[in-house]
Amino acid sequence: MKTIKTNDAPLPIGPYSQAIETDDMLFVSGCLGINPKTGDLKQDLQGQTRQALDNLVAVLKAGKFDITNVVKTTVYLTSMSYFNDFNKIYAEYFKDSFPARTCVEISALPKGGLLEIEAIASKK
């Protein structure tokens, strides 16, 4: 088991790792739409979605994986009214083959985030 850490994505805001690699799998903790350089949360859904996905890509890269290795994502939205707008941006990142996905509405996220994305990636 190996802990993955990169300054190209926000550092954890609690007692957890950005990602854990085990065998040929990478388990990425939830990514918020926080700019890793400033620590600020993007203000709108589009900005948070792009930043969260950029943060996910950065963690994948730090573990020597890429977005094509993602087999499963879990998406947490604070309102299902964001679903269609979120999907448009999500489809820009996952182009060739969409991973399995769960998307749920939750009441709140850390720092007032509108969404969070976690992922499982595999090299097999």
Image (cartoon, helix red, strand yellow):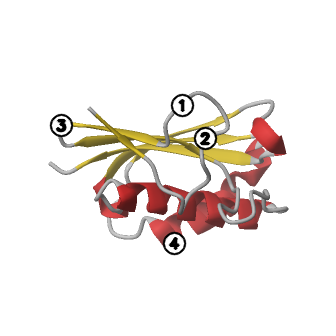
Q: Specify which label sits upstream in the sequence, 1 or 3.
A: 1
In this view, 32 is above or below 36: above
Q: Earlier in the sequence, mark 2 or mark 4?
A: 2
User: Residue drawn 73% across and 67% down?
Assistant: 47
Quarter assignment of residue 45: bottom right
Residue type for callout 1: Tyr
Distance from the alpha carbon under mark 4 to that under mark 3: 29 Å
Res 16 label: 1
Residue 54 position (above or below residue 11): below
Tag in front: 1 or 4:
1
Q: Which of marks 4 and 3 is nearer the N terminus?
A: 3
Q: In the rendered structure, which disc, 1 or 4, sits on the residue that comes first in sequence?
A: 1
Is label 4 in contact with label 3 (beta carbons under 8 Å)? no
C-alpha span from label 2 to label 4:
26 Å
Q: Which amino acid does label 2 sit on?
A: Pro
Question: Mark 2 to mark 3: distance in Å?
Answer: 23 Å
Q: Look at mark 4 in the image and give the residue it sits on.
A: 92
Q: Where is residue 73 in the image (x, y as percent from the top left)?
A: 46, 44
Can residue 98 be spotted in the picture?
A: no
Residue 110 is left or right of residue 8, and the answer is right
